[in-house]
Image (spheres, rainbow, N blue to C red):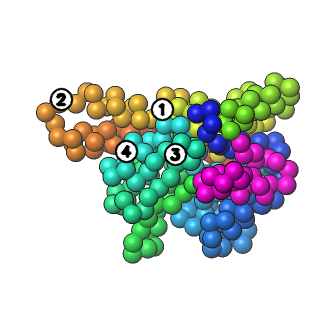
């Protein structure tokens, strides 16, 4: 993972200008979905959003997990984790089962519900730009460098440096470093992450590991399809439980 690329978002530096949001729209040729970007939400036409929580702002987008659950549950290999870091999607292979949406621990993939030939949509971490040695569009557009693009190892080092040198400014944790086995998109913040709408219930263990644990408990005589569906059921049940607990605890609510 040393040469993999990723993003670091610093909520303490974000000024809520929406430059990242607009750059993503332009780069991916996405239509206007809300004139007030702060009121927009992730969809098949919006790959990243900026949300306001009091005086702070948070970005939401695909986390590009180190061990993506979407890759492990897709029965036709429509999702792949690239050597460069981004998790990509091949619409030509997709059969529309939407297992990826159910399994994602961060609830990021979106579906084209209004299309007669629906596909899954999400951020691809500007893979085409990274291949050319360029920054992602969102990082390049940020006027205050609240979003940084670079090698994952460098971003982790920078996040740790900021937290160490400014202990009173940051909550002592890097969101995305351990959650769901780690990801290429990470966040640092002056407040606990649930106060910015990030779930604190995402397990540290990579989610594909849970799928395998569920499968290992099933007799070998069961068909491959049955094993797969049982693993998916287990993941979905766990994810729904986490979401229900979040709602009961009032997590993710904006101030």
Distance of label 1 from label 2 (alpha carbons): 23 Å
**Residue at the spot 58% in from the left edge and 38% down from the top edge:** 183
Q: Tell me the number on the disc at residue 206.
A: 1
Distance of label 3 from label 4 (alpha carbons): 16 Å
Question: Mark 1–mark 2 contact, CB under 8 Å?
Answer: no
Query: Which residues are the magenta region?
Result: 125-150
Q: Which callout, 1 or 2, points at the residue further toward the start of the chain?
A: 1
Quickly name the residue at label 3. Answer: 82
Distance of label 1 from label 4 (alpha carbons): 13 Å
Q: Residues within 10 Å of mark 1 (few under 14, many from 20)?
A: many
Instruction: Based on the picture, tell me whether residue 9 belongs to the magenta stretch.
Output: no
**Residue at the spot 64% in from the left edge and 42% down from the top edge:** 5
Q: Which callout, 2 or 4, points at the residue further toward the start of the chain?
A: 4
- Which mark is nearer the camera, 3 or 2? 3
Q: Which callout, 1 or 4, points at the residue further toward the start of the chain?
A: 4
Q: Which callout, 3 or 1, points at the residue further toward the start of the chain?
A: 3
**Residue at the spot 85% in from the left edge and 50% down from the top edge:** 144
Question: Mark 2–mark 4 contact, CB under 8 Å?
Answer: no
């Amino acid at each position: 993972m040393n040469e993999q690329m990723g993003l670091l978002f610093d909520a303490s530096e974000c000024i809520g200008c929406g430059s990242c949001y607009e750059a993503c729209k332009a780069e991916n040729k996405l239509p206007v979905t809300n004139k007030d970007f702060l009121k927009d939400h992730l969809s098949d036409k919006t790959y990243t959003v900026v949300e306001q929580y009091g005086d702070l702002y948070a970005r939401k987008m695909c986390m590009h997990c180190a061990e993506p659950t979407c890759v492990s549950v897709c029965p036709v290999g429509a999702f792949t984790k690239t050597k460069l870091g981004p998790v990509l999607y091949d619409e030509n292979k997709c059969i529309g089962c939407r297992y990826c949406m159910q399994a994602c621990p961060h609830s990021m993939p979106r579906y084209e519900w209004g299309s007669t030939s629906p596909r899954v949509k999400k951020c691809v971490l500007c893979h085409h730009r990274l291949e050319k040695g360029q920054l992602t569009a969102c990082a390049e557009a940020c006027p205050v460098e609240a979003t940084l693009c670079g090698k994952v190892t460098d971003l982790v080092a920078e996040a740790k440096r900021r937290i160490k040198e400014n202990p009173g400014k940051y909550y002592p944790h890097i969101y995305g470093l351990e959650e769901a086995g780690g990801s290429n998109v990470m966040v640092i913040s002056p407040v606990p992450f649930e106060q910015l709408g990030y779930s604190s219930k995402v397990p540290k263990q990579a989610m594909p590991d849970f799928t395998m644990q569920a499968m290992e408990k099933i007799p070998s005589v069961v068909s491959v399809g049955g094993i797969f569906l049982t693993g998916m059921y287990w993941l979905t049940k766990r994810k729904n439980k986490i979401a229900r607990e979040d709602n009961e605890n009032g997590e993710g609510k904006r101030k």
